[in-house]
Image: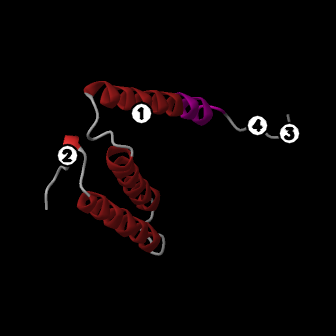
Amino acid sequence: MAQNGSHGHPTHGVYYAVFGALVIGTLLTWGVAFVDLGIFNPIVALAIACTKATLVILFFMHVRYSSKLTMITVAAGFFWLMLLISLSLSDYLTRTLTLGQ
C-alpha cells in the first residue's frame, strides 16, 4: 500500500487505518471505564483521547501533509490552550473553600 497518493495526500488505505485506530481507541476508552485503575483512570482515558485527537488533526484535517506554517499554527494553538488551562487551574486550585460567607 502506498503511503502517499498524488500531491502528497494520503491514500484511502491511510484513512481506513486511521479510522480503525479511532474505533479501537473508542473501544479502549469504553473498556477502561469498567476497570478500576484508581487514580489512573482519568489519566489513561485522557491519554487515549489525546491520541485520538492527534490522529484526527494530523490525518483528517490534513495537517500531516500541510506546510510547516500550518504545523506551527496548530502547535501554537495547542500551546495557547495549555497556557489558558494551566492558568485557569492554578487560579482554581489555589482558592480556599469558605462556607457561609
Q: Nearer the viewer, residue 10 or 36?
A: 10
Distance CA(mark 2)–CA(mark 1): 30 Å
Q: Residue at x 21, y 40 (%)?
A: 7
Q: Are marks 3 and 4 in contact (CB under 8 Å)?
A: yes
Q: Give SS at disc 2.
A: helix
Quarter placement of the N terminus: bottom left
Q: Nearer the viewer, mark 4 or mark 1?
A: 1
Res 58 quadrant in image: top left
Q: Which mark is residue 78?
A: 1
Query: Dot 3 corresponds to which residue?
Result: 100
Residue 28 within the segment the image draws in magenta: no
Q: Which residues are magenta?
A: 87-95
At label 4, the amino acid type is: Thr
Q: Which mark is residue 98?
A: 4
Q: Are marks 3 and 2 in contact (CB under 8 Å)?
A: no
Q: How is the image coloured?
A: secondary structure
Please count the marks in the image.
Answer: 4
Q: Give SS at disc 3.
A: loop
Q: What secondary structure predominates along the stretch shown in magenta?
A: helix
Residue 89 within the segment the image draws in magenta: yes
Query: Dot 2 corresponds to which residue?
Result: 6
Which class describes the residues within 10 Å of circle 3: few (<14), some (14-19), or many (20+)? Answer: few
At label 2, the amino acid type is: Ser
N-term-proximal mark, 2 vs 1: 2
Q: Is residue 71 left or right of residue 30?
A: left
Which class describes the residues within 10 Å of circle 2: few (<14), some (14-19), or many (20+)? Answer: few
Q: Nearer the viewer, residue 33 or 68?
A: 68
Distance CA(mark 3)–CA(mark 2): 67 Å
At label 3, the amino acid type is: Gly
Which class describes the residues within 10 Å of circle 1: few (<14), some (14-19), or many (20+)? Answer: few
Distance CA(mark 4)–CA(mark 1): 34 Å
